[in-house]
Image (tube, grey):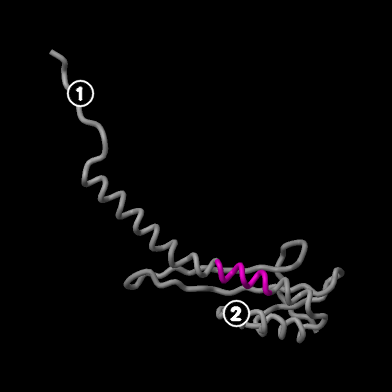
Amino acid sequence: MVAIDKQRGISLVSLILVLAILGFVGLIAAQVFPTYTEYRSVQSAVEKAKTAGSTPAEIKASFDKSAEVNYITSIKGSDLIITREESGMEVSYAYDKKVHLFGPASLLLEYKGTTSKNGMPATAPAQ
């Protein structure tokens, strides 16, 4: 007689637990993804504004136009930090995005960026 091996595989309880974890991760990803795409739009609009203007006012106005077209609501042209450097005008920005998860739980995402080659965001605006 041949002995029957123990059954292998995942139990129903384990399957439900794995699906619950995947569902929770999917829920968070579904709520974070739009904020990331907005961040990429902000990066693109800042790069475009930098090339479109030669003064801080022109750069801010150009950013506001791009923000309106791209549905950017987290940051405005007045929030941009524009500095003069050796290579010309550099634009930096930073903003927070709060994503409500459930009940009292929320997730705070901190986005920042710059057009500076050294990657360091400016702290003081241009005069």
Camera-nearest residue between 49 and 115:
49
Q: Amino acid at mark 2?
A: Ile
Give the side of residue 74 with respect to residue 6, left or right: right
Q: Nearer the viewer, mark 2 or mark 1?
A: 1
Magenta: main secondary structure:
helix
Q: Quadrant of residue 90?
A: bottom right
Give the side of residue 107 with respect to residue 50, left or right: left
Where is residue 100 shown, x and y percent of the image? 40, 72
Where is residue 50 shown, x and y percent of the image? 76, 75
Residue position marked by numbered label 1 in the rendering:
5
Residue position marked by numbered label 2 in the rendering:
75
Determine crowd level at label 2: few under 14, some 14-19, many 20+ residues with C-alpha closer than 10 A.
some
Question: Residue drawn at (70%, 74%), measured in percent from left and top?
Answer: 46
- What kind of element bears circle 1? loop
Give the side of residue 86 with respect to residue 72, left or right: right
Q: Which residues are magenta?
A: 37-45
Quarter of the image that includes the C terminus: bottom right
Q: Quadrant of residue 88?
A: bottom right
Residue positioned most to the left: 1
Asked whether the beta carbons under mark 2 and mark 1 sit within 8 Å of each other, the answer is: no
Does residue 12 belong to the magenta stretch? no
Where is residue 78 shown, x and y percent of the image? 67, 85
Camera-nearest residue between 81 and 51:
51
- What kind of element bears circle 2? loop
Vertical comparison of 48 with 12: above or below: below
Does residue 38 belong to the magenta stretch? yes
Determine crowd level at label 1: few under 14, some 14-19, many 20+ residues with C-alpha closer than 10 A.
few
Residue positioned most to the front: 69
Question: Residue drawn at (72%, 65%), measured in percent from left and top?
Answer: 120
Q: Amino acid at mark 1?
A: Asp
Q: Give me the C-alpha separation between circle 2 and circle 1.
A: 62 Å
